[in-house]
Amino acid sequence: QVQLVESGGGSVQAGGSLRLSCALSGRTFSLYNMAWFRQAPAKVREFVGFITFNNVTYVRISDLGRFTISRDNAKKLMFLQMNSLKPEDTTVYYCAADLRYAGESTDYKYWGQGTQVTVSS
């Protein structure tokens, strides 16, 4: 049973930075494609970026240059480094994992519970 736990969320002023972490337990982390999504209340969950098991990364165009995804297989962690944060980045961030799928849809098999990010102006 795969479990995902996000951490690192919190409150920050506009222009600041946060680094989110996602810990995977229960299976071999290095085999999984991992992704970040975010979802505001009453809105569709939206893709942020992914990193494959072999370290291919993709961040959506609108966040390119601000957000960076990385992973540490030894620590079984994936990271989302967010810089130059804006108030519109305020929402809940989720990590996801899948052995086969890596893409922009929500077809990942496993999901975390989310971590809140709040950016004040």
Image (cartoon, grey):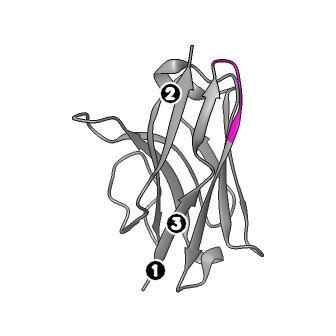
Residue range in magenta is: 14-18
- Of circles 1 and 2, the one toward us is 2
**Label 3 belongs to which residue?**
5
Query: Residue at 40% of width from left, 60% of height from top?
Result: 113
Q: Nearer the viewer, residue 8 or 55?
A: 8
Question: Is the C terminus in the top left, top right, bottom left or bottom right quadrant?
Answer: top right
Whole-angstrom CA distance, mark 3 to mark 2, is 20 Å
Secondary structure category for the residue under label 1: loop
Residue 43 located left or right of residue 86:
left
- Return the disc, 1 or 2, that comes first in the chain's sequence: 1
Q: Say which element carries label 3.
A: strand
Q: Amino acid at mark 3?
A: Val
Amino acid type at circle 1 is Val
Q: CA distance from mark 1 to mark 2?
A: 28 Å
The answer to whether residue 16 is magenta is: yes
Residue at point 50%, 27% (across, down): 89
Q: SS at mark 2? A: helix
Question: Is 33 covered by the magenta stretch?
Answer: no
Residue 4: x percent and y percent?
A: 49, 69
